[in-house]
Amino acid sequence: MLELLKELVLFFKEHKRYSLIPVLVVLLLLGALIVFGHGSVLAPFIYTLF
């Protein structure tokens, strides 16, 4: 996992694609929302957002 993060940082530095960072952050947050909201008590509240 750490190697993947290192590769992403090197990619952003080398190719100067800093505009992709917000996209990755949003995707990670949505993934975390799906994982944590799947079987929790907060699931009904998360479903009302969508």
Image (cartoon, rainbow, N blue to C red):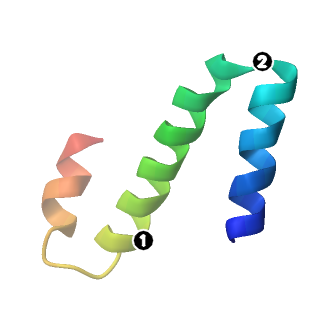
Give how far apart the Cα atoms at labels 2 and 1 are.
Answer: 31 Å
Residue closer to the observer: 16 or 30 = 16
Given the image, on which type of amino acid does mark 2 rest?
Lys
Q: Which mark is residue 16?
A: 2
Under tag 2, what secondary structure?
A: loop
Where is residue 28 shown, x and y percent of the image? 51, 51
Q: Is residue 28 rendered to the left or right of residue 43?
A: right
Q: Which quadrant of the rendered structure holds the C terminus?
A: top left
Q: Is residue 40 left or right of residue 10?
A: left
Give me the residue at 77% from left, 65% from top: 3
Mark in the foreground, 2 or 1? 2
Element under disc 1: helix
Q: Which mark is residue 14?
A: none
Comparing 46 with 11, the one in front is 11
Residue lying at 50% horizontally and 40% vertically, measured from the top left? 25
Residue at numbered disc 1: 35
Above or below, 8 relative to 40: above
Q: Residues within 10 Å of mark 1 (few under 14, many from 20)?
A: few
- The residue that appears at 41% across and 61% down in the rendered structure is 32
How packed mark 2 is, by other alpha carbons closer than 10 Å (few <14, some 14-19, many 20 or more), is few
Q: Residue furthest bottom?
A: 39
Query: How many tags in the picture?
Result: 2
User: At which x and y percent is residue 42?
Assistant: 15, 68
Question: Up-down: is 5 above or below 41?
Answer: above
Q: Quadrant of residue 15?
A: top right
Q: Position of residue 41 (x, y in %)?
A: 13, 77
Q: Is residue 42 left or right of residue 25?
A: left
User: Split into 4 quadrants, where in the image is the N terminus?
Assistant: bottom right
Residue 48, x across and y down, in percent: 18, 47
